[in-house]
Amino acid sequence: MESAKIMNFNEKKKISLYSVGVNLVLSIIKIIGGTISGSAALTADGVHSLSDLAASLSVYAGIIISNKKSKLFPHGLYKVENLVALVSAFAIFFAGYEIAKDVLFGEAEPMKNLLVAVTVIGLTVLITYLYSRWEKTKAIELNSPSLLADAEHIKTDFYTAIVVLVGVLGQYFGYPIIEKLAVVIVIYFIFHSGFEILKEAIKVLLDASLDYDSIEKVKKIVEQNSEVNKIIQITGRNAGSYKFVQLDLDIKTDSLKEAHAIAHQIEDDIKKSMPFVEKVVIHFQ
Ligand SMILES: [Zn+2]
């Protein structure tokens, strides 16, 4: 179990560093491409990628901090990951606002080099599409809210790139209104994804109950133990990538020693089939 946790941590650290690299590359090619081509939308999107770079650096920091053990925080710093997801939700809202401001109310200028703009956008579409899909699969595998939030954000960057492409073509062919209409659609995507991340983060930070599926899974495992008479209550909460479970059970024995052994058995069974369960607390009646 301990080695699985270390692997989970190393994997998350590695992926969050990849995100820093992806955003660094995107910022550089968009700002250079936007300047050479004379596309204000592409340059604005490059500035947005710079704010993503800052956000991905904070995800990286969040993953490292959440793994630290500390006397001041005896229950662990797991929720730092959810806190980082919360901050990245606001980074998404801010990016949406920036795009709206730049493209809807910015000055339209003629296009100098369409090929450069289209090439940079093509690269952006490819990178963001493939990377967000890969990162989402990994985030679900590792049960990591901050990586999932990052993957969702990079997916919105994919939509943004498509809108910038439509805007660039509109600008090139002399229809700046197309650019403005497309931007409205993207802003909807951006705010929607920001809101979803915000909702999840707040639920976990306020200790909302463990999801129904997890509780049902725990129930099935406990019911298989022949020493258990009755399950009185199952409660639980999330923190970061981990789940904490609390059980109130009526068991067959009166012996403290046997009860202790049963508790260990149940905890092992749960942790074996639910790798993200960090702790099981059992009360006997
Ligand atoms: Zn972004």
Image: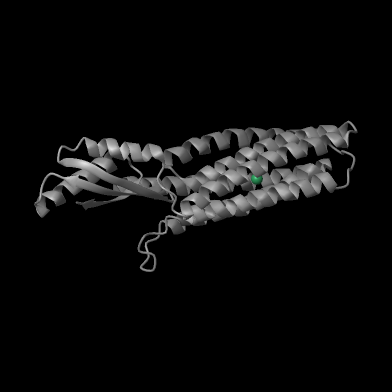
Q: Residue furthest bottom?
A: 72
Residue at point 27%, 40% (across, down): 272
Vertical relation: 173 (above or below) 110: above
State whether residue 89 appears in this view.
yes
Q: As drawn, is 73 to the left or to the right of 265? A: right
**Residue name at image x 76 percent, y 39 percent:** 184
Judge from the rendering whether residue 172 lies leftward or rightward of residue 5; answer left or right. Answer: right
Residue depicted at x 34% and y 37% = 216
| Residue 14, horizontal then vertical, whole percent | 47, 46
Tell me the quadrant of ligand 1: top right
Q: State whether residue 114 appears in this view.
A: no
- At 66% from the left and 42% from the top, the residue drawn is 190
In this rendering, position of residue 241 left or right of residue 52: left
33 and 251: which is toward the camera: 251
x, y percentage for residue 187? 71, 42
Q: Position of residue 134 (x, y in %)?
A: 52, 35
State left or right for residue 229 relative to residue 55. left
